[in-house]
Amino acid sequence: MAHHGFYSSATQVEWACRALLSGRTIGHGDEISEAQGWRLAAIVWRLKRRYGWPIQTAYAGPENHAQYKLEPGCDRSRLRFPRSARHMSEGGAQ
């Protein structure tokens, strides 16, 4: 998997979108083991701020590790997608 400086690769962004859309609650450990990434907080920030995804953050465990999930009942047909995940949108491109 190619990395682009300090930015997340397209594969990591796609992984995060797919995981969130599937209803999972994800954290950094999930990203490290499944997508070999280390920028989940940056990906989530971008999905929330740039694309308007309604992502909830909770903190778990004694070290307060962030856990992310889509708000229950969010209208997935209204989500905007980053380029690497547009094929997951209902229209296939945005």
Image (tube, rainbow, N blue to C red):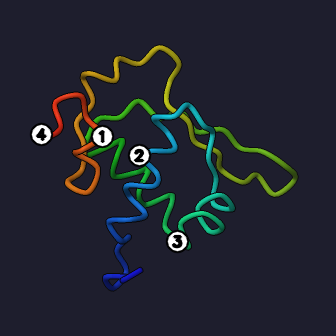
In this rendering, position of residue 6 left or right of residue 28: left
Residue on which the image places disc 3: 37
Dot 1: element: helix
Q: Is residue 66 left or right of residue 15?
A: right
Q: Which secondary structure lies at badge 4?
A: loop
Q: Secondary structure at mark 2?
A: helix
Q: Does label 3 or label 4 sit earlier along the sequence?
A: 3
Q: Are marks 3 and 2 in contact (CB under 8 Å)?
A: no
| Contact check, label 4 and label 2, Cβ < 8 Å | no
On screen, residue 49 above or below 73: below
The type of residue carrying mark 3 is: Gly
Under circle 3, the secondary element is loop
Residue wearing tag 4: 94
Report which residue position mark 1 lands on: 88
Sequence-earlier tag: 1 or 2: 2
Viewer-nearest of labels 4 and 1? 1
Three-letter code, disc 2: Cys
Which mark is first along the chain, 2 or 4?
Answer: 2
Tell me the residue at 30%/44% (across/down).
49
